[in-house]
Every structure is written in structure tokens, then in C-alpha cells.
Image: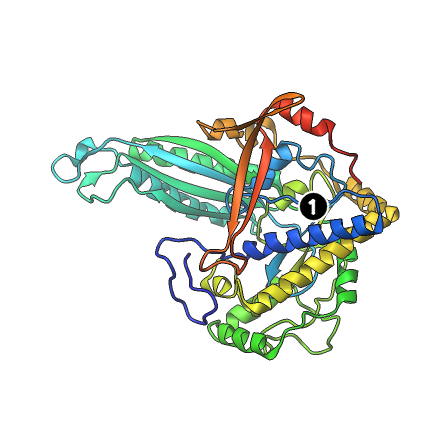
Amino acid sequence: MSQIADIDEQREGEPGASDHGCGHNLLGVGSLLAAISLAKYLEAKGLPGTVRYYGCPGKEGGSGKTFMVRAGAFDDVDATLTWHPAPFNGVRSTNNLAVLEYYYRFKGTAAHASNAAHLGRSALDAVELMNVGVNFLREHMPQDCRVHYAITDAGGRAANVVQAKAEVLYLVRAPEMSQARALAERVDQVARGAAMMTGTEVEIVFDTAATNLLPNLTLENAIHENLVAIGPVPFDEADIDFARKIQATFTPEAIRSSIKLYQIKGDVFSNEKIDGSTPLHAGLRAFEGHSHFRAGSTDVGDVSRVTPTAQCWAPTWAIGANPHTWQVVAQGRSPAAHKAMLHAAKALASTGLDLATSPSLLAKANAEWNTELSGFPFPASRRPPSCSERIAVTLSIRSHANTGVMSFLSTTTVFGTAVDVTLAELTLECFYPADEKTQQSLMAGVKEPL
């Protein structure tokens, strides 16, 4: 979606552009601030420890961290901490849903849609029949599962042609990866049935996946204690006024749904009931000390399967804001959002310091993680395709070193467009080893992590 920032009405910025409808511009910068602050503090105090920051690509639909996990990026990490923008401040322990992503590509036979329709076999008909079939399937799947789709190729814009090709993208979600895989098999059967009914062929392409999150109550409690010590986010009247204007665009149901979604049942700093009458959350969500269901998915789940992982939320949006909407984009670079981002960075840096200076905390987190771990859920046939499988041509960067020629792939993240964050000219470039020899050379020079 495209939306002009800092206004309280829906207004498209650049047609066809995509802006930050989930707050990831804040997520990445806040995490970077936490990592730099902690590293500098450890260095200044002469404390041992290694702080590693990952800029993770393709979170929305790309499952970037899934690929990073498979490549071993987190194998030597003792614990990971992250955060996410939200309407509320605090720790919310969730399980989330595992998700599988498939493309269903139908191939038919083109024909004139009027004088030779009997010769055509419509791939678009097959897509539509598949969607109808999956809609009926929803009645017969577990209530905590989700299936949704988008038609990514309707075959063309000419109505007088029987469409010879069409494509639909499906996301299949379930509380456990094994359940998601079983449900995906049923969706596959519906697709094959649609192809059979229309005399077309279907190619089922598995694209990406993310497993369900494995919470770590030990780390979550540590973050919560630091949030208590830090206090509420210091919003001012201007912040509240802008949030109130944004909140005026929500329905009462949206506000109630937001409070219910984040399981707000008490506040550490206030005895008043949170009902949305105050547009920004200037308190701290009471942490109940146990996990609960949330119908979203995240590739953080894959990280949580290889190292203890925890995250917190910070109130960058008005109460009632729903991710992937223009209201979230409009608030994405506001002063209130930046204050909440700094708040999250302080909590993560403080918790990282606790882990660096308290071996018992890290040991307790690892003990809980080992107890809860049920094993990585992807069999080889279901793992996301490697970069070489997905990208036909890749340009590498070669550098001559004492150990020989080293090859790298690079990714660049640029912040600072007209409707993005206010940090103009900030560019993060990450280099990854392009072959095993380069990786071994780099690892030989890496100091033992914390």
C-alpha cells in the first residue's frame, strides 16, 4: 500500500508503491540501536561478550530468517532478542501459527471465447473452482487453522480469450507445522480436482514456510522486568492529539478487537481499565507468565527452534490500529513511534546486558528451551528452496585475501524515502559468504561468542 505519512486521512502517496504497513522500518532501526548500545557498553566496561545484529530480509512473505536458520546463521548464538511495533507496550507470550506458502499454476488451452470456446480449457476457471473448493474445505478444518489466497495471475485482460494460464498463491496456517502440512495436502487435492474438472494441468510450487514460535518465558520475564524498570513511554500532548485523530478513523469494534487481540487484562502502572479512551498506551501490559494463541505467523519461529528467543511490543500506533493498513503507515515515522522505538531498544539492550552478566539467567533460558524443544519441523522435501534453486543468475563479489580469493553475496537495505522513516541516507549493506571456502575462512577468524 502507499500512504502519505503524518496525516490522519487515507491519501495515496506514490501509486503502486509499497510502504511500511507493519512497522518494520521501526523494528530494524530499534534493534540496531539496541545492538550498538549494548556492544558499546560492554566494550566501555571491559565486559566479555559478542553482540550480533542481523538485518533480516523478506519478513513479509519471504521468510528470510527461515533461510538464514537453514544456512546456520544462528547456530552459534546463545539467545536472540527482538521486538515489534504494536498499539501496546509490554511482553506478550504467544505461540503463533506455522505457515506454508504455495503457488498453484494452472495450464490450459487458449481459444476464442465465443466462436471456439469448446476448444479451450480455462486455467482461470480452474483457479476459481479451486478457490470455491477451499472455501468449502474451511468448514471441515480445525478452527484454529487459517487458509487464504490471492490470484497472482488471472491469465490476461482480454475477456474474449479462454485463459491458457492462471496462478493463485495460498497461505496455509496451523498451530503446529505437522498440522499445516496435513492441511496443505488437502488443499493440494482440491487443486488437482479443479484441474481435473476443467481439463487443465496444475503445477504445485512450494515457496516458503515459517514454523510456529517457541516462546521462552524466562527471557520474556527478563524483558518485562526491564520494561517495569524503564517506566512508561514519555508521550506528550502532541503525540496524544495525533493518535486521537488516527483513532477517530477506527470503528468501536476495531478498538475492542485490538484490546482483545493483545490480551490486555491489566496494567502495571495504572489501575484504570484500558478501553481505548486514551488513544496511546502510556502504561505497561501486565505479563501473565504463560503463553497463549495468536493467529499470526513469523519467521522468528524458525529462529526460536535453534536458540532461546524472546520479543516485546512497543506502542508505536494508536490503540485500535491493525497491521497492514494505511493508519499504520501514517504513524510510521511519527514522534510517538520514534519514542516507542527507543523504549523497545532500551528494553532489549538492558535484557542483553542481563544475559551477558548473569550466566544463571542464560542457563535457565537454555534449560527451558531444551525442555520445550520438539525438533525442527521441516523434512528435506518441505524445506524452502535454496538461493541457487530460486535465483537462476547470481552476481558475486570477489576479494583477494591472504587465504586466497573470497566470494560474497550482498544485500542492501535503504531507509529514508519520502514516506518512510526520517533517517535519510541510512544504508545497511550486509555481505554473506557465497561459497563454503569463504565461510570457513571467515569462521576461522571469529572469536568465540558469549
Q: Position of residue 154 (x, y in %)?
A: 31, 42
Residue shown at 51%/28% (left/top)? 396
Lateral position of residue 55 relative to residue 44, left or right: left
Instruction: Specify the amino acid type for callout 1.
Output: Leu
Q: Position of residue 254 (x, y in %)?
A: 52, 68
Chosen colour scheme: rainbow
Q: Which image quarter holds the C terminus?
A: top right
Whether residue 179 is visible to the viewer of this picture, yes or no, is no
Residue shown at 51%/56% (left/top)? 424
Q: Position of residue 132 (x, y in %)?
A: 38, 46
Q: Which of the 4 quarters of the picture holds residue 423?
A: bottom right
Q: Position of residue 388 (x, y in %)?
A: 50, 26
Residue shown at 73%/29% (left/top)? 445
Residue shown at 46%/56% (left/top)? 417
Q: Which image quarter holds the N terminus?
A: bottom left
The one of 417 and 402 positioned closer to us in this rendering? 402
Residue at which label 1 appears: 214
The one of 370 and 114 positioned closer to us in this rendering? 370
Whether residue 11 is visible to the viewer of this picture, yes or no, is yes
Residue 48 versus residue 277 in the image, above or below:
above
Residue 280 versus residue 208 in the image, above or below:
below
Regarding mark 1 in the picture, which secondary structure is present there?
A: loop
Q: Which of the 4 quarters of the picture holds residue 49?
A: top right
Q: Which of the 4 quarters of the picture holds residue 338?
A: bottom right
The one of 298 and 59 positioned closer to us in this rendering? 59
Number of numbered callouts drawn: 1
Callout 1: few (<14), some (14-19), or many (20+) C-alpha neighbours within 10 Å? many
Residue 285 versus residue 62 in the image, above or below:
below
